[in-house]
Image: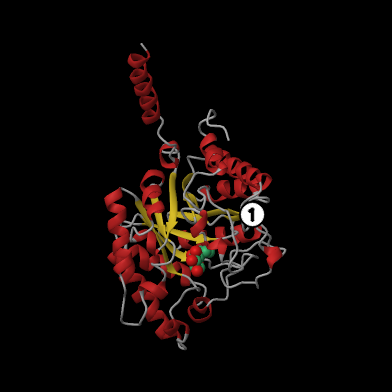
Amino acid sequence: MLQRILPVIACTVLAAQSFAQPASLKTTFRNDFLIGAAINTRQIEERDTTAARLIPAQFNALTPENIMKAEIIHPQWDQYNFDLSDKLVDYARKQGIKVNAHNLIWHSQLPGYVRRIKDADSLRSWFAGHISTVAARYDGKVYSWDVVNEALNEDGTMRSSVFLKMLGDDFVVEAFRLAQKAAPHTKLYYNDYNIEQPKKRAGAIALIKKIQAAGVRIDGVGIQGHWRAANVPMKDIEESIRAFSALGIEVMFTELDLGVLPNPWDNTTADVGRTAAYKADMNPYPGGLPDSVERTQADAYAALFRLFLKYSGKVSRITFWGVDDSGSWLNDWPIRGRTNYPLLFDRHGQPKRSFFSVIGTKNATAGY
Ligand code: XIL
């Protein structure tokens, strides 16, 4: 008798297992917004086996973490390096994933020869050539561009970058004008950190209105979202979704991660130029995350996704700045060599409590 029943039990267990697909972010939120991840060179080249498994299963949007920045894609005045960007575009096409190209104009990660330019005419000609060449090459192949990244100060005034100093404060409008011409089939976005904060948000709104008043196309705004798990500015975020979408553009969260490590400064910033020295007490969890911190992060992610869902008609994409905790830039910024845990997948690519809390905002039975 037992011999006859055992195979039946075995089959039932197997059937139940194959039925229980692991949860997927992109499937869970398919009617709400795109779910993206920033990816690095190893991941584009499919050498990272964890990412090669997670990316197609979990994400329907990708942002290159570094390889489309000017210092890599345009290393010499008359030389472009499209190898990795072409690979990314091919990989995404094969997987049916949208690419948000990042970025055309940013004061950071500029090649040395651009930083050494001394006259406005040369910089203007680099600026026009760079935008036209790079944006045209990927028009219709990438879904969207971060045309200008981080042009604002915390008080909402324009950041004193090489572009502002030499080209004047119309450089943002000009960048969008050139991108619109070179990439008519690509969405065009402004991207920055802390623009959920009232003063900087007001500066971003003024900038977007200025682009619109010039008759130039801007399709959306990216709020980076490098926040701290214990202190997510929920009210500012909600006000920002309302205020930016009132301008008739998409709102996106483009570089989301919720760090759990101590901050070397009082204020929060994602300014890549600001760094601090390593101290052991700044790296409290090298061996693993305490349960209470894990819970704080899971709750913060859940609160955020509940808010994103409330505004799913206005929020078009949520992109995490990395695939799993091992590859997060927050392990090395603002202090090198720390162990941070900001994303939804752990160092082995396994879903964390925060992953289940995010899925649970849509599917109340998921629990965490
Ligand atoms: C970061 C990358 O993640 C790092 O690998 C690199 O060393 C520095 O830049 N805001 C942005 C991103 O718009 O391009 C930055 O990415 C993080 C802050």
Q: Is residue 196 visible?
A: no
Q: Quadrant of residue 26?
A: top left
Given the current orientation, which residue lies at the most extreme top position? 1
Q: Quadrant of residue 24?
A: top left
User: What is the image's colouring?
Assistant: secondary structure
User: Can you say whether 61 is above or below 353 in the image?
Assistant: below
Mark 1: is the Cβ under 8 angstroms from ligand 1? no
Residue at left 59%, top 64%? 270
Image check: 204 left or right of 267?
left
Q: Amino acid at mark 1?
A: Val
Q: Nearer the viewer, residue 293 or 49?
A: 49
Label 1 neighbour load within 10 Å: few <14, some 14-19, many 20+: many
Image check: 298 left or right of 12?
right
Q: Quadrant of the C terminus?
A: top right
> What residue is pinned by disc 1?
260
Q: Position of residue 70 (x, y in %)?
A: 41, 73
Q: Is residue 350 visible?
A: yes
Q: Give the number of marks.
A: 1
Residue at left 60%, top 49%? 237
Q: Quadrant of the N terminus?
A: top left
Given the current orientation, which residue lies at the most extreme bottom position? 118
Q: Position of residue 2 (x, y in %)?
A: 38, 14
User: Can you say whether 174 is above or below 60 in the image?
Assistant: below
Q: Position of residue 357 (x, y in %)?
A: 56, 38
Q: Secondary structure at mark 1?
A: loop
Q: Position of residue 172 (x, y in %)?
A: 47, 68
